[in-house]
Amino acid sequence: MGNLNTQNGHSDTAGQKFVAHVRASDGSEQSLYDHLTGTAEIAKTLATKIGLPLSGELIGLVHDLGKYSQAFQTYIRDSLKFDNYKDLGLDEDEEAELLMKGKPTRGSVDHSTAGAIFLYNKFKDRPKKNNAAQGALLADILFICVASHHSGLVNVVDKEGQPYLYNRKTKPKDKVHFQEALSNAINNKLFNSLDKKTINAAVVEFHNALALLLREDSKPKQKDFYIGFYTRLLFSCLIDADRSNSIAFEYPSQEHLLDHKRPNWQIAIDKVEALYKDFADKAKHSPPNPINEQRDRISQTCFEEGQKPQGIYTLTVPTGGGKTLASLRFAVQHAKRHNLDRIIYIIPFTSIIEQNAQEIRDILEEKSPDGSYDEKWVLEQHSNLEPDVQTWQSKLIMDNWNAPIVFTTMVQFLESCFGGGTKGVRRLHQLSRAVLIFDEIQTLPINCYYLYCNAINFFTSYANSTAVLCTATQPVLDKLPIEQNGSLNPATEIIGNRDDLTVLFDTLQRVDIHDHTKNPQDLDGLTDYINENFAKFGSTLVIVNTKAWASDLYRELSKTAKSEELFHLSTGQCARHRKDLLATIRKRLKDGLPTLVVSTQLIEAGVDVSFKSVIRFLAGLDSIAQASGRCNRHGEMRNAAGKAIKGQVFIVKPDAEGLSKLPTIALGKAQMENTILPILKEPENASKHLLDPDIMNIFFKGFYQTDHAEKQMAYPVDDIHTVFGWLSNNSTNVAVSNDNKQRIDNGQFPKLWQSFMEAGKAFKAIDAPTKAIVVPYGDSGRELITALYGTQVNDKEFYKLVRETQQYSVNVFPFMLDKLIDAGAITQVRDTGILTLSETFYDEQMGLNIEGDGKLDFIEGF
């Protein structure tokens, strides 16, 4: 295989059999040789996507070299002996001695540094006449990948300036059993084909991969970020290869994880085109409909643009314009045209993943007689339902996005790109050679702007991917304020030029928007206002900014509204709960029954509902536009004479609102009050409506220029450090700053100096500090929890159960989780890390109740 002899089928033969893993179910042993060569084979396949197949193969081959030591072999056998001591027939004294000694501590034998040092030395000792600087850089990158494969990416320097990478390189070889492990590996012919020619070929391969990066017109800070991202992607290939090989041994039924075949996109294209032909046939026999005509134009444009070159695209379509199906039409055409591996939909909220995934599944997948799907095309990932501690069980549970079409969340995407540890990064390589469709991109957290833009630049410039940014309210990410941090690379608008967008938005303008913010109202005033609106229109959606306001309004409205007419939606409910509520809501709306819904902003991002009126708490223009998309969504409203009329949207302002924990909403709200609403009152803007693309541009440009927004965009950790800084030039680090002065003179450019681990810890702590818990919603939720506890982890049914739990999970903040644990409301499913909730702490109307007493109070700002 390639330059290295890494085919399976050879076992360790020099005396002792060196073991990599022992299967828990039957005690079978996986030889270390088979694990290393098998991992190398997979890693090579994965790293081919970023042009570094040899590098992938090398790190796969050496990553567990330290396991060739007697210390590790003793560790693994002692661990097994401790776990199974009851079956060994020991007498009382032997058993007591074993228990007193205790189980060997996980990680007590360093088995990753030996391989890192071995590979580093191979590159260090090569002739320096060709690509010397890049050879040294590659040596560092490969060292970091191998040394980090259990901890997550380690620092080059830590935040105090301590040279962690240098210290790890110079760790005494006897501490990592280097000579012993290397001797045993060589005796077992592991490195038969690893010679200088192979090392030089890897450097040439790396040089070719970097050539475009080094000559293109990126800022130096961006180049540093890109070098770090190359490291992270290669690390991802190693982690997935290692985990996949290990899982396939431990659970042979999961061997499909090793299958990385490219799908036949023509099959998907045929099904999508058949659907659009059916639409066209029906349209021939229906009265003309301007909205459907615009939807047809959007989808046809997406079909045509799908044939174009790879890069960054925007799809700016008003809500209700059919962008989910249109983007699929673009994606399948584009995937076939460029021979890509997968399509990944990145969606802001779990609340709409199932809705959109179901829409695609209905088109592409065959339905079985029992109503289930064959799961050949679509994979959904609903939540963070993954343990922090890596065990055999959690490795099995964790999806690696190995499917043709994946639906996931923005949080999961960002965690894979920037989080610490090894959990999320395993999937990162799947984002290469793919079509990445970002739905409702305006919901991207502001503190991730520079991280996101540079990641997308990397994927589309160096990893053979295409990105499509979909929304009705397109943020101008190509014009961010801090030049050296780098904005998004230029994007192609699929719909066309500014005039094309204006015509589209004017045609699909289905609502009138009224500014009723002049007189802020308290809870009683807003309750009366909503009741009057509901009495007039019969279907009203109220969208608020915080769970606290949603809870308070729901309670007050329940005093007058009929129980069957009033609904509440928030992230305190699991996805299945919200799905059931939305199904009831949609049916009532379709049947013309009175329907009053109080919701947080989760309903704004693509949820397919259509009310006659919408009341929106004041927020950014993007939020107001999205709220408007839930009103007269399909242009279906008619007067008594059958003539089309517009839905009505009302912007209101509460007298008090705690937004300290929601700074993006607070900034958008201020921008509306101070800039946008006053602009529309000027005579020269009398013809413009609030949702005009030009007004949206003014909103975003002003929004980005606020002091707070600028400070937030690089993911601040404190007053000095940012995550983006730690992952790029690390200029705030004293050690790096001193080194930076000599970077050109010493010929070491580009050079690694990232604080990877510091960034990973900070990103996880700041961005997504929630934990998923499985809730007992309805009979199905309770039965699912019972089944989890009644099924063995190595049973093939357990994996299916875990996937089902994603619909029954709620993410909670640490203080909420602590409170639930103290109340005895949380139980763990064995050692999987999966947490389940007691029945009394989940309300069938409102969802999670952290008090367990029916009083659904929320902390202000959540």
Image: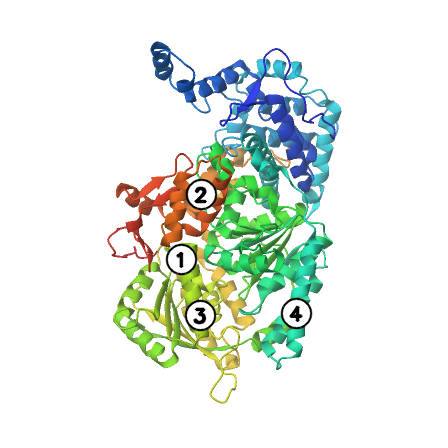
Image quadrant occupied by the C terminus? bottom left
Q: Which residue is mark 3?
A: 587
Q: CA distance from mark 4 to mark 1?
A: 33 Å
Instruction: Look at the picture and state if 88 lies above or below 748.
Output: above
Count neighbours of disc 3 (C-alpha within 10 A) and say few if under 14, some if 14 to 19, many if 20 or more: few
Give the secondary structure at mark 2. Answer: helix
Q: CA distance from mark 1 to mark 3?
A: 16 Å
Q: Which residue is mark 2?
A: 764
Residue 318 is tagged as none
For label 3, the SS is helix
Viewer-side residue, 848 vs 275 = 275
Among numbered discs 2 and 4, the one appearing first in the sequence: 4
Residue 811 vertical position relative to residue 681 in the rendered view, above or below? above
Badge nearest the viewer, 2 or 1: 1
Could you tell me which residue is drawn at 43 percent across and 21 percent down? 84
In terms of image quadrants, where is residue 516? bottom left
Q: How far separated are the C-alphas under marks 2 and 1?
A: 27 Å
- Residue 226 lies, in percent from the top left, at 61, 43
Q: Tell me the distance, in whole angstroms, between the alpha carbons under discs 2 and 4.
A: 46 Å
The x, y position of residue 251, in whole percent, is 54, 33
Quarter of the figure with the N terminus = top right
Q: Identify the residue under disc 4.
A: 278
Q: Which residue is mark 1?
A: 577
Residue 312 locus on image (x, y percent) = 64, 56
- How many labels were placed on the picture? 4
Pointers 2 and 1 in contact (CB under 8 A)? Answer: no
The local secondary structure at tag 4 comes to: helix
Quarter-of-image position of residue 529: bottom left
Q: Amino acid at mark 1?
A: His
Mark closest to the chain's N terminus, 1 or 3: 1
